[in-house]
Amino acid sequence: MSPDVPLLNDYKQDFLLKRFPQTVLGGPRLKLGYCAPPYVYVSQIVLFLMPWALGGTGTLLYQLDILRDYTAAALSGGLMVFTAAVIQLISVYAKSKSVVVKRMITRKLRYSSTIPLFIVGIPALEQANQILHILFVLLPFLWALGTLPPPDALLFWAVEQVLEFGLGGSSMSTHLRLLVMFIISAGAPVASYFIPSTVGAVVFMTGLGFLLSLNPTDLSMVFRCGVARHRVGSRCEAFPGNSGYWFRWKECLLCIAVLGMALLEAGLLHRYASSSQVSRSSAQTVVGYVLMVLLSILWLLRETQSIYIFGIFRNPFYPKDIQAVSVLFDKQSKLLKIGAVRWILLTLVSPLVMVAFLALDSSLHRLHSVSVSIGFSRAFRTVWQNTENALLETVVVSAVHMVSNTDCWWNRSLDTGLRLLMVGIMRDRLVQFLTKVQFAVTVLLASWTEKKQHRKLTTTLCVLNAIFAPLVLIIIVVSTVLSSPLLPLFTLPVFLVGFPRPVQSWPGAVGTAACVCTDTVFYQQMVPRLTSALQTAMAAGSLGLLVPGSHYLGRFEDRLIWIMILECGYTYCCINVKGLELQETSCHTAEAQRVDEVFESAFQQEHPQVCSLNEHLENVLTPCTVLPVRLYSDARNVLTGIIDSPENLKEFKDDLVKVLVWVLIQHCSKRLSMQENTHRPENKGKSSPVVPPASNSPPCPKSLEDSDSSNSDTVHDWSDSSIFDDEPAIKNRKEKLQLNNLPCTNLPIPGSVDFQSADDHSAGTGPKNDLYRTVMLGLPAVDKGQRADGAYIPLVEFSCSQSRLLSLPEEWRSNCTPRSKIMEMSPLFPEDWYQFVLRQLECFHSEEKSCVLEEIAEDTALKDLYIHTVMACYIGLFGKDNGVPSPGQLVRVYNGGLPWSGTLDWLSEKPELFHLVRKAFRYTLKLMVDKASLGPIEDFKELTNCLREYERDWYIGLVSEEQWKEAILEEKPCLFCLGYESSMGVYTSRVLMLQELSVHIGKLNAEAVRGQWANLSWELLYATNDDEERYSIQAHPLLLRNLTVQAADPPLGYPIFSSKPLHIHLY
């Protein structure tokens, strides 16, 4: 990236210079963008100063004691209303007179913010008056700088802050869930305030806090299933959730057991504590020490699960050899056992110990107060909602109480609930402050040390930041107090306070928008597998502390997965997964390479020291762990020397005939198996006998050779009723004749024409049977005026009665290819391969299976059917020329571009046969690539195994086909695609293999993400800087700026996949 990339292009610079003063000043357009007379600007200035003059008149009269305050305010307001009315009347008059005047005075004045306030007598109101005066002056600046929040963002931010810190809840995955949870949670302290018994209040707060910390989705499913079971009277064992996870009855029993233990413990301990003040205080002190020990153990166990301790020192217990996936996962299993111990301590032990600490508190025995109800309602819920943070807060409060004087303000004026509330707020703001400082330092140092980020103004900005460091620190503190993002203007070291917004950062619903493309399917297949792996890692603590608003980045091959935590509670977590583009741009590639370097230095490099330092400590990405996920590996190869080899091309034609034979026979055998499976339940296992042709029927042709065909590619110019069409006139007959209904006299001699009306046959209502429909092969020509639709087609006589079960469908048997050409190409038909394939069939289950297959293989009529159809399909692919195909011709046919011929028309009219022929061609091409890569095929058995593997485990087609997407979603083990790279002039292949692979997961600096998203919002919505090559979207190896912009919600960002909120149960 060039450091001279403009922050704003010329057009946007001109627009911003016009719009920014207008926004700040509240209306005047000092730069119109076109030539205007001087009086236009003078008029705007006069109009702009008019409210100041009118308001100042009232203020001056009040200061001189000429008028009272309310009289002066009424006078100023009246003058402003009068002036506004006059201006509007002038505007209406001017609209019909002059366009210039119209453009001059259509600006509306913002009088509402310039009316002076006169509030005296009450000190609090006078102070508010002064603050509002200052605020009103700053409103345009705050709006222009993006600090003034929109009403909806302000509302949800305020609700989220109150729910999290005042009521002990968590930010929610949707706005509706947030509002509903806020309303329900607000009722907890109100209800506890009116409970007369302290024991009842403690038990109520404990139970309600536990229930509110559970996943609302699971609770609703339990309720709905209970109602359904009550209505239907059926058993309901599982409850489907949004993520596909089944909230089984075992989890229900666990929650019920934990809730029962907590209620019993809280009630008994509170009852016990009320008997003696001394015993209560000493017991709570003992519990406080236990909590300190638990916090230390949990911290140690959590740090052993990640690659780095505090993100700085490499964990000596983490596996060192991770290049071998199987070895890595075996070593990780040992850490997971430690993680299981941590889960027990965190999920079961710690909440119960904290409930004991709260139940023993003396504040609960005092008279009810608002502070006690609010503080302890929050405390009893936070124990379950966010156990790790609650444990830290409880330990801090307990430790301060032990070491501080009992007469200090902290212990005397505040009860334990309010202390926990204040410590919780301070903990959250301290973490935000540290991450914001780290983000600001990274932006500042990167602009100086990174050559590609060094601009002409960099030195000046760095000096100004050093001089005004206290002001920068104040900005960071204000941003921290408001819990709003720290906005780096254009991602330069110019810091502003972004407007407060919810954790989600974007107003739309999660997962409703994405820039869908052909690569989206890879993320769709990945998400369920990734969610399962994340479930184990989160439960073990491998991803660190789970807090709403945390961001993680996953990397595998060319795929980048963006994970955001939306909501957390007791044993569950709600996330959103986004997939970034795979077609990498230069900026995307530069940052992706840095991500690979960060992960490689952590997981793949040898570290001589036991606790080596993180080499990329300044980066916003900190590696966490490696997850085993079943994914598609993507390999792309150049086929130069394979697809253009003359030997391979020559073998391709021979292999194509073999594969065509195999595909057609397998298709017929599968059809037979499906028919048997369909009739087996009806016959209760009894096989229906096969009825052979009647013995008294006249002799039928032994094979297709007995009837001649004079079809050619030019006969399509004949009449529509010509019997030489691709499908003869018999195709209009809908009836299917049974063998028993075929009297001997109705079977004509070969080549004759039956002139009976088609209506005579359509009157039959018997069951349909395609197997006994007569075949029309060589009928004499019929003039246009003659009736040919009544032609009667003779049967083909098979030497084996079972051959008809593997016979090709009737509509495939006739084609427009001249018989002489088929006979000329027939030597290419591999009779030995044909018989071998038939003998390997598994569609017959009788005891005489081998004898039956042997008879079928020796049936000449059946063989001639296959020769006729296979050769016709072969000619349809390559035409009548028997030369060696070119590589370009193979690629065109692979993509569906068959050469035009009459046979192609015949194939196109039979979609099922066309699909089989295309599949056979693609199988053959894949076989050619495999033979060139892995070696030649030794015998027929190896070739059969290879084709069966293609049929079972492979999808061979095109990326643009819908079946390609379906195969990935169905997790077909392997996929193959052929392509041509026009820029390089080479043929390529793409192979996808489904296997257990490692996905690297790292944690991002949450404030760096929020800050860059805040700048993106300001830059595109306020400055309207939508230039695709703008500075703030260029590659930044430390901030990962381009990837962060991609991960934003559309239309500002452009992820190619975004999931709905996924609920992960941490069991």
Image (tube, grey):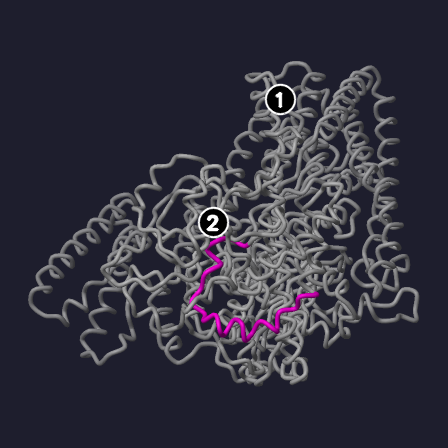
Quarter holding residue 1006: bottom right
Report the amino acid beneath label 1: Ser
**In the rendered image, which residue does mark 1 sit on?**
192
* 434, 855: nearer the viewer: 855
Instruction: Work out whether 419 lies above or below 270.
Output: below
Residue 153's disc is 2
Report the amino acid beneath label 2: Ala
Q: Position of residue 314 (x, y in %)?
A: 85, 63
341 drawn magenta: no
CA–CA distance in space, label 1 to label 2 = 31 Å
Residue 905's disc is none
Q: Report the magenta stretch's main SS.
A: helix
Asked whether, in this view, residue 365 is left or right of residue 742, the answer is: right
| Residue 1039 in view, yes or no | no
Asked whether, in this view, residue 459 is left or right of residue 1015, the answer is: right
* 460, 960: nearer the viewer: 960
Q: Position of residue 846 (x, y in %)?
A: 72, 41
